[in-house]
Structures are given as structure tokens and as C-alpha cells.
Image (spheres, helix red, strand yellow):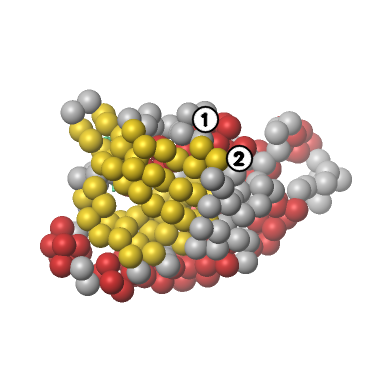
Amino acid sequence: RVGPLTLTVDRLSVRYGDVLAVDDVSLTVEPGRIFGLIGPNGAGKTTLLDAVTGFARISSGRVALGGKDVTRSSPVVRARAGISRAFQSLELFEDLTALENIVAATDPTSRWCYLRDLVYPAPLKFSAGVLDAIGEFHLDQDLDHVASVLPYGRRRLLAIARAVAGGPSVLLLDEPAAGLSGEERRELVTVVRRLAREWGMAILLIEHDVEFVLDTCDELMVLNFGRAISHGPPCQVRNDPAVVEAYLGGE
Ligand code: ATP
């Protein structure tokens, strides 16, 4: 585990050809806090996450973790430094079991490839993070099932469990509530809050589900054409006329 660290994005811009996908955006997410990014399709939300993880080339500005500049670090270095991400498209290892999925993301020696021959509970010692993730997401019943056969809601939780099992400082979630039932959504609200408040993670999430955002986030930023058009406590942002016009009014 890396321990609690603050994520700082400072005057960040990402350009794709003629498109300024992210335009001079600054934000800070402290440990224990949940920061929501909302905005219309194409506003630059995913590109901002890509820039934080190191998958999008930053045109200007900087990204820092715990005050340390990682702007020029590779995605692998940033992951080891404590930045983790769960994807909108899940990106699970479909042929592996739920347990193997979780362990694969945490164990640098990839010992998961030997797990199949073992009877659970395996005589291997899993890291505390793996066990915590299994418990937090109530995945005990799913451990032996290959990811591809799990219902969508369980797959979504598994993808987030895998992202947290290594004990990251910063967790990036791309539309975590998409496709969930009402009950699964409520369960996820509880889990996300606990990851911040009890695990001490700094969480930056993208979400179109406004109710989920209002239930989880301490702070909100609205992006439109790459720019932050509003930023502050959720109740303030929600009533900002610029936001209602650019985004919420169109819902
Ligand atoms: P959505 O809610 O639909 O996921 P978004 O807010 O995440 O949208 P981005 O996917 O970050 O928005 O896209 C921002 C802009 O950058 C869009 O105009 C998009 O077409 C463009 N863009 C994103 N990725 C690339 C890329 N790899 N190459 C070229 N342009 C891109």
C-alpha cells in the first residue's frame, strides 16, 4: 500500500489535432474525498482521466501525486506510485476467475497463473488488499467463477475491486454506476463512500448518473468543450445557470 496521497492536476491541457480535448483544467483531490467530473458527451472527461494515468499526451500543465510531479512518468510508474483506474468498459480478464482477476492486478510476479491448479482456500498468502477487496465488495461467492459468466452488476464490482486491491492512493472511476440496477447502485454508493472515508482514497469519478454523483461526491466539476464551466460543492454546481444551460437542462 502506498498510503494517502493528494492528486493535483494543474492547468492541464490535452490536444488531439485541432481539438483541445482538455483545456486548462485544474483540480485537487485529497485523501478521503470524492470528486465528480460531469459534462456532456465529448466534454473531455475520459481524456482527463487518460492524462492522469499517463495514456494521453499532456500538451501543457502538470499532474502531481503527493506533491511529486508525475507529468512525464509512464503509466506503469504512475500505477506503482498509487494511481489506479476502473474502466467504463470493465476490461476484465474474461477467462480468469474473479479471484484471479483481483490477484492479477496486484501481484507483480503474476502468480495468478498458477492458481487454477490449487483448491481454494489456496495455501498462498494473499495480500491484505486482496482480502479486503473481496470482503468490501462481497465477492466471496464469485471467487471461483470465471469473469465472463458473472452477472453485469457483479462484473462491475469485480472491476472496481481489482482496481482497489493493490491499495492505491488515488482511484479513478469511469462511469461506475452505468448499467447497474437500483439496488446495485445503492450498494455501490456505500462502497465508494467507504473507500474514501475508511480506506482513505482520493477518488476522482466520471458519471452521467446525476443522482449517484449527488449521493457520493464532495465536490463537482462540470466540463464542456474541455473547459471547467463550474466547480464547487454539488448543490452549488447543480444550480449554476451555466450548468443547467450546458448540461443538466438537456437531460
Ligand atoms: P463521453 O462522455 O462520451 O465519454 P468525454 O467527456 O469522456 O465523453 P472524451 O472522450 O474525453 O470526452 O473526448 C473529448 C474530445 O476529444 C472529443 O472531441 C473527442 O472526439 C476527442 N478525442 C478523444 N480521444 C481522442 C483520440 N484518441 N484522438 C482524437 N480525438 C480524441
Spot occupied by residue 211 in the image (x, y as percentages of width and height): 34, 70
Q: Ligand 1 sits in which quadrant?
A: top left
Residue drawn at 57 percent across, 31 percent down: 76
User: What residue would you read off at disc 1?
Assistant: 73
Residue closest to the eye, 70 or 145: 70
Residue drawn at 76 percent across, 38 percent down: 115
* Mark 1 neighbour class, 10 Å CA radius: few under 14, some 14 to 19, many 20 or more: some
Which corner quadrant of the image does residue 216 belong to?
bottom left
Side of 5 relative to 108 (left or right):
left
Tell me which amino acid carries mark 2.
Ala
Residue closest to the eye, 26 or 166: 26
Q: CA distance from mark 2 to mark 1?
A: 10 Å
Residue closest to the far top? 17
* Marks 2 and 1 in Cβ contact (< 8 Å): yes
Tell me the tag on residue 81: 2
In terms of secondary structure, where does tag 2 sit? helix
Residue closest to the far front? 67
Vertical relation: 85 (above or below) 113: below
Q: Count all numbered tags in the image, as a single digit.
A: 2
Residue drawn at 33 percent across, 65 percent down: 232
Whether residue 152 is visible to the viewer of this picture, yes or no, is: no
Tell me which amino acid carries mark 1.
Ser
Residue drawn at 46 percent across, 34 percent down: 71
Side of 106 relative to 182 (left or right):
right
